[in-house]
Image (cartoon, helix red, strand yellow):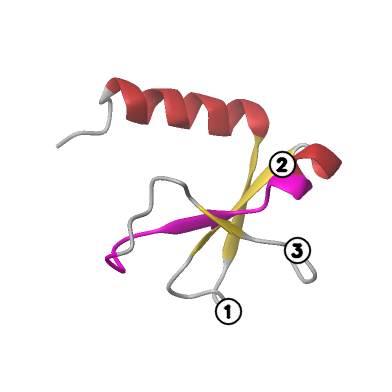
């Protein structure tokens, strides 16, 4: 995924913690949501379909993944 403009999550703080980046322009262009670890920008990126990503975000907000 070269030439993509990555954006840090608005929920990421400035403390250097666990952050993700995503590429909103790719969502509009391809219908997939690219996501990567902001601490390792040269590492792998994952691409999710919008339906799967929306379901994941809803699950996080609902607390479905709390330990």
Few, some or many C-alpha atoms within 10 Å of disc 2 (few <14, some 14-19, many ≥20)?
many
Residues at marks 1 and 2, CA–CA distance in whole angstroms = 20 Å
* Left or right for 29, reference 56: right
Q: Which residue is mark 3?
A: 4
Residue at 77 percent across and 71 percent down: it is: 2
Residue at 55 percent across and 34 percent down: it is: 53
Few, some or many C-alpha atoms within 10 Å of disc 3 (few <14, some 14-19, many ≥20)?
few
Secondary element type, mark 2: strand
Q: Which residue is mark 2?
A: 32
Q: Earlier in the sequence, mark 1 or mark 3?
A: 3
- Report the residue that reaches farthest toward the front: 14
Residues at marks 2 and 3, CA–CA distance in whole angstroms = 13 Å
Residues at marks 1 and 3, CA–CA distance in whole angstroms = 12 Å
- In the picture shown, does residue 23 fall above or below 43? above
Few, some or many C-alpha atoms within 10 Å of disc 1 (few <14, some 14-19, many ≥20)?
few
Residue at 14 percent across and 37 percent down: it is: 67
Q: Which residue is mark 1?
A: 42
Q: How many marks?
A: 3
- Report the residue that reaches farthest toward the left: 67
Residue range of the region highlighted in magenta in the rendering: 15-26
Instruction: Using the image, tell me which numbered label, if any, was put on residue 51.
Output: none
Residue 37 position in % (x across, y down): 47, 64
Q: Nearer the viewer, mark 2 or mark 3?
A: 3
Secondary element type, mark 1: loop
Residue 43 position in % (x across, y down): 54, 75
Secondary element type, mark 3: loop
Query: Would you say residue 22 sits in the magenta stretch?
Result: yes
Q: Earlier in the sequence, mark 1 or mark 2?
A: 2
């Amino acid at each position: 995924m070269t030439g993509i403009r990555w954006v840090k999550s608005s929920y990421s703080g400035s403390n250097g913690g666990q952050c993700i980046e995503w590429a909103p322009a790719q969502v509009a262009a391809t219908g997939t949501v690219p996501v990567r670890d902001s601490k390792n920008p040269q590492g792998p990126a994952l691409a999710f379909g919008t339906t799967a990503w929306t379901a994941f975000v809803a699950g996080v907000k609902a607390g479905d993944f709390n330990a």
